[in-house]
Image (cartoon, rainbow, N blue to C red):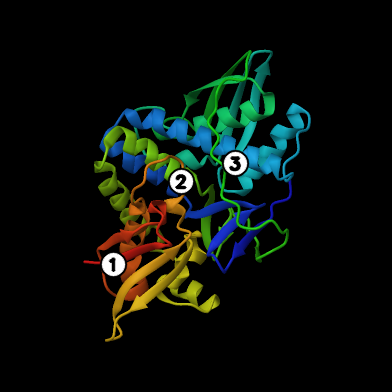
């Protein structure tokens, strides 16, 4: 399929063939998984498999609904989707072997082991969920995926997976993406530059992730951990911001005619950001419209943008010259008009 990535400046979001996405620095998804794993341990596996399976399934269904992705024969469709996810920074999926009721696949350049985090276990939880949902969409049957080798465990040079295929279509959750426009070719066309380290946008190697992945993941973690998840989200975002240390964020701002926190929508697709200054010219608060962190995937009426708070706080020294502790005061997930952040 042809990738059509566009930046909608008015709302500060990226759309991939009409589906909202967020741009993470290369290795960002693995970093997030590892951060959670250090806190909750073995429970990480099921949560990340479920989150990636649900969101990739939903993403592909949205592309099919929008006619960007067409149903072809199984082999042709698998090849098309494999190229798509390679272009988005997830690595290249390929078939190792297959028979009537199973298929073995590998991923070269796998996003889930790109950082080579050494763990004493097979560790590609998110990739396992991704493969399961891709095969489920193509085959229309139940698919159970097991990781068979992983570079993060040490000693292997490839990530491979075994998928058992059974009758019935199973039960997959669907989380639709919010629609921002019904017109084609609206917004600024963004070219995904290909490099050895994956796609590049704004001179930064990226992973292009469906935006609803984050609110869905955090919702599942909140079900298990309650309010303690809020601090984990903040710490995750604050620490993830360090991955931008090697990149020229000021240069990104100059290219787009912005400065400070105004470059965050271009970096990530956060939603439009409006810094509010006080009477002395200092930063008073930040208002974020259409925050990706506030998208609803459940019915809870609560503030949600702790991950975005951490990202803003973690990047504050680079972008504003002062290290800030960021607190969300209002959230569009609570029916406020926008998300409001202040500083401590």
Give the residue number, with chain letter if any, for mark 1. Answer: 342
Q: Is residue 331 above or below residue 279?
A: above
Q: Secondary structure at mark 1?
A: strand
Q: Are marks 3 and 2 in contact (CB under 8 Å)?
A: no
Q: How far is mark 3 from mark 1, CA to CA?
A: 33 Å
Query: Badge 3: how crowded within 10 Å, few (<14), some, or many (20+)?
Result: many
Q: Judge by depth and name the residue closer to the eye, 228 or 135.
A: 228
Is residue 124 visible in the rendered image? The answer is: no
The percent coordinates of residue 201 (x first, y second) are 56, 61
Task: Give the label on residue 296, or none.
Answer: 2
Q: Secondary structure at mark 2?
A: loop
The percent coordinates of residue 171 (x first, y second) are 55, 23
Which mark lies nearer to you, 3 or 1?
A: 1
Q: Quadrant of residue 241?
A: bottom left
Give the residue number, with chain letter if any, for mark 3. Answer: 59
Query: Badge 2: how crowded within 10 Å, few (<14), some, or many (20+)?
Result: many
- Of the residues under marks 1 and 2, which one precedes in the sequence? 2
Q: Secondary structure at mark 3?
A: helix
- Of the residues under marks 3 and 2, which one precedes in the sequence? 3
In-image side of 305 versus 59 (left or right): left
In-image side of 175 versus 141 (left or right): left
């Amino acid at each position: 399929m042809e990738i059509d990535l566009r930046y909608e400046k008015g709302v500060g979001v990226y759309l991939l063939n009409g589906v909202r996405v967020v741009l993470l620095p290369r290795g960002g998804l693995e970093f997030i998984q590892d951060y959670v794993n250090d806190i909750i341990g073995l429970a990480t596996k099921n949560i990340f498999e479920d989150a990636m399976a649900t969101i990739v399934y939903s993403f592909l269904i949205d592309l099919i609904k929008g006619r960007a992705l067409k149903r072809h024969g199984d082999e042709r469709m698998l090849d098309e989707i494999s190229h798509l996810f390679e272009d988005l920074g997830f690595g290249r999926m390929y078939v190792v072997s297959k028979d009537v009721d199973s298929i073995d696949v590998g991923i070269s350049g796998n996003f889930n082991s790109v950082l080579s985090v050494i763990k004493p276990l097979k560790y590609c939880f998110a990739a396992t969920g991704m493969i399961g949902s891709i095969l489920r969409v193509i085959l229309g049957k139940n698919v159970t995926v097991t990781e068979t080798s992983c570079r993060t465990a040490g000693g292997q040079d490839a990530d491979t997976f075994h998928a058992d295929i059974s009758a019935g279509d199973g039960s997959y959750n669907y989380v639709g993406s919010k629609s921002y426009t019904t017109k084609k070719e609206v917004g600024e066309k963004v070219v995904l530059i290909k490099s050895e380290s994956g796609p590049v946008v704004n001179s930064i190697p990226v992973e292009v992730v469906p935006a609803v992945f984050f609110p869905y993941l955090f919702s599942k973690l909140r079900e298990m951990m309650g309010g303690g998840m809020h601090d984990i989200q903040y710490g995750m975002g604050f620490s993830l911001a360090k991955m931008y240390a090697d990149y020229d964020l000021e240069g990104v701002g100059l290219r787009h005619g912005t400065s400070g926190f105004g470059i965050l929508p271009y970096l990530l697709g956060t939603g439009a950001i409006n810094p509010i200054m006080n009477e002395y010219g200092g930063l008073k608060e930040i208002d974020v419209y259409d925050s990706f962190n506030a998208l609803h995937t459940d019915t809870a009426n609560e503030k949600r943008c702790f991950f975005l708070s951490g990202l803003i706080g973690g990047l504050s020294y680079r972008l504003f010259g002062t290290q800030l502790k960021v607190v969300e005061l209002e959230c569009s997930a609570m029916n406020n008009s926008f998300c409001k952040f202040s500083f401590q």
